[in-house]
């Protein structure tokens, strides 16, 4: 499927964030959903592997049937929100029992009012899997038929068009999820095999009838956090790639700066034992293993004679913070990734609609599990950490392009005639521009709560928008990191240092040079950046062994 290409975002050192490539529920060519054990890696594997399909565990399906049977019995006996009442502030309106199915249809149609560009198809696919998994927990009262319709759409990669604007993330992603529900009932548009098209003719092609919503099913489909969570499922893995590149770029930069090795010393970090800092320092030590360019602190300390005369020495005894403080800067980002991943995996295995059907206790509990603040806050935390990583990369770029700062390389890493040729000067403007935009996007979006829905939804999460902003920041960060890697390769050529690099840095250098040769004569570099972006997004597992 063309729209789902180039999504292989696997990386090495960040796999410690939560296990292997896929979770424990993938069996051969199927991802078996049970409502409780879905992992982020499972969904990302399904996104990149078109042959992988979804199945449902028999135990989960029985819970769905039991919940649906109980709801159908009780719908005439009790006043149940969204089943036989109006929605939101209209809860005081009881609905004619002959029109309960119409109520659900009206809910979906009225809320399918989003505007703007469609969100990425992989986000929609992830959202559909999350929604399906939560319904399989058996607390939503939906029928087996709705489960089958969702599975069909997912397995055939029929992906509804979901506009970017509309959801405030409280009562969940109502508007955006309504567009997914709309496609299930045969209305609206979808992406299928890379083409945007109306869903109705496509369903006729498959000989699949539009689904007819039953009691509570419209509410169960749109009342929840599946879109914001689905977006975050994809972003977590992209953030892992970004973090992995940050580690590798940082290690390579230390080598090219001829940095002192003691900033990575295990003893130094043991006395400030934050887990992320310990992890980053350990990883950097592995990356620079067998590097020939790092300096030994003891050699520096014994190189100069201490006497009664003041004098200036010809060596800078400590690197700038963007080099010396890598474990202290990247460590918190590592810990944030762990926290965010945990929040997202809890959310995707949770019941997030309302009311919640407890068949064992024969009760309908009304509450706010649809409120998206957990995911919204996680999205903002991820976003802010990635902005910090972007700032770090931009400062490392400046270090190598600024001859006055590095004292070692020609201005802008010029390999020919400084003044006449400009080297990589243009790339710094791009990195600075992108970094500035990331800084503007860094403000936590979950704080932008505006009361809505006739003041019924008076404190909202803005979770879907927070996740989409995190997506923009992640894509920006990847662009800046690619610029940095191109600059590190050029610095390697300036110093003729390829044979003195660590194996990790040398492998990365060779991968870059296969796509983008050294800049001797000035040339437009936009094409090089595009090729490198595609390379790292599609072959990260091969480039980062």
Image (spheres, rainbow, N blue to C red):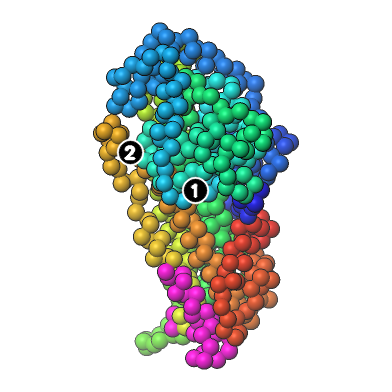
* Boundaries of the magenta span: 404-433
Q: Is-magenta flag for residue 55?
A: no
Residue at x 36% of width, y 87% of height: 310
The x and y percentages for residue 260 are 52, 71
Task: Give the quadrant of the C terminus.
Answer: bottom right
Q: Is residue 460 above or below residue 481?
A: above
Q: Mark 2 — residue?
A: 460
Name the foreground residue: 143 vs 394.
143
Q: Mark 1 — residue?
A: 119
Secondary element under disc 1, as helix, strand or loop, is loop
Q: Is residue 396 above or below residue 381?
A: below
Q: Is-magenta flag for residue 422?
A: yes
Instruction: Give the label, 1 or 2, closer to the camera.
Output: 1
Density class for disc 1 (Cα within 10 Å; few <14, some 14-19, many ≥20) is some
Name the foreground residue: 67 vs 424.
67
Residue at x 53% of width, y 88% of height: 421
- Does the rendering let one see residue 298? no
Cα separation between marks 1 and 2: 21 Å
Residue at x 33% of width, y 38% of height: 460
Secondary element under disc 2, as helix, strand or loop, is loop
The x and y percentages for residue 140 are 48, 22
Left or right of 459? Residue 16 is right
């Amino acid at each position: 499927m063309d729209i789902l290409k180039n999504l292989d975002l696997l990386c090495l050192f960040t796999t410690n964030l939560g296990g292997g490539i896929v979770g424990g529920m993938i069996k051969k060519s199927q991802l078996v959903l049970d409502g409780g054990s879905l992992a982020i890696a499972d969904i990302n594997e399904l996104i990149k592997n078109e042959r992988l399909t979804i199945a449902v565990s028999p135990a989960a399906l029985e819970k769905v049937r039991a919940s649906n049977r109980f709801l159908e019995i009780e719908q005439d006996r009790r006043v149940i929100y969204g089943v036989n009442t109006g929605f939101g502030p209209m809860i005081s309106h009881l609905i004619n029992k002959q029109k309960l199915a119409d109520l659900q249809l009206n809910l979906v149609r009225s809320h399918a009012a989003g505007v703007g560009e469609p969100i990425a198809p992989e986000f929609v696919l992830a959202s559909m899997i999350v929604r399906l998994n939560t319904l399989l927990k058996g607390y939503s009262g939906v029928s087996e038929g709705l489960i089958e319709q969702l599975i069909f759409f997912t397995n055939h990669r029929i992906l509804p068009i979901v506009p970017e604007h509309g959801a405030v993330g409280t009562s969940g992603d109502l508007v955006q999820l309504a567009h997914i529900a709309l496609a299930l009932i045969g209305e609206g548009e979808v992406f299928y095999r890379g083409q945007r098209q109306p869903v109705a003719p496509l369903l006729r092609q498959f000989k699949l009838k539009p689904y007819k919503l039953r009691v509570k099913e419209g509410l169960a489909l749109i009342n929840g956090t599946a879109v914001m969570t689905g977006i975050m499922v994809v972003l977590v893995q992209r953030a892992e790639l970004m973090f992995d590149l940050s580690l590798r770029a940082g290690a390579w930069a230390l080598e090219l700066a001829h940095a002192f090795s003691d900033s990575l010393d295990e003893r130094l970090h043991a006395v400030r034992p934050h887990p992320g800092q310990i992890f980053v320092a350990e990883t950097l030590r592995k990356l620079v293993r067998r590097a020939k360019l790092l300096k030994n602190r003891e050699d520096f300390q014994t190189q100069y004679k201490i006497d009664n005369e003041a004098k200036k020495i010809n060596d800078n005894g400590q690197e700038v913070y963007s080099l010396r403080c890598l474990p202290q800067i990247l460590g918190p980002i590592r810990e944030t990734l762990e926290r965010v991943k945990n929040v997202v995996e809890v959310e995707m295995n949770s019941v997030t609609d309302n009311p919640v059907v407890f068949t064992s206790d024969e009760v309908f509990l009304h509450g706010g599990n649809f409120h998206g603040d957990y995911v919204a806050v996680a999205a903002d935390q991820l976003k802010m950490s990635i902005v910090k990583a972007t700032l770090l990369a931009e400062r490392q770029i400046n270090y190598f392009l600024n001859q006055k700062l590095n004292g070692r390389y020609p201005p802008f890493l010029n390999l020919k005639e400084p003044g006449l040729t400009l080297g990589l000067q243009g790339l710094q403007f791009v990195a600075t521009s992108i970094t500035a935009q990331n800084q503007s996007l860094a403000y936590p979006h979950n704080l932008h709560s505006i009361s809505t829905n006739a003041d019924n939804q008076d404190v909202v999460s803005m979770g879907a928008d927070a996740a989409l902003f995190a997506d923009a920041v992640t894509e920006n960060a990847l662009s800046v990191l690619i610029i940095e890697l191109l600059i590190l390769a050029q610095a390697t050529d300036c110093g003729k240092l390829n044979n003195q690099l660590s194996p990790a840095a040398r492998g990365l250098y060779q991968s870059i040079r296969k796509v983008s040769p050294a800049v001797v004569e000035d040339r437009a570099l936009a094409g090089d950046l595009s090729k490198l972006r595609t390379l790292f997004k599609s072959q990260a597992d091969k480039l980062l062994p």
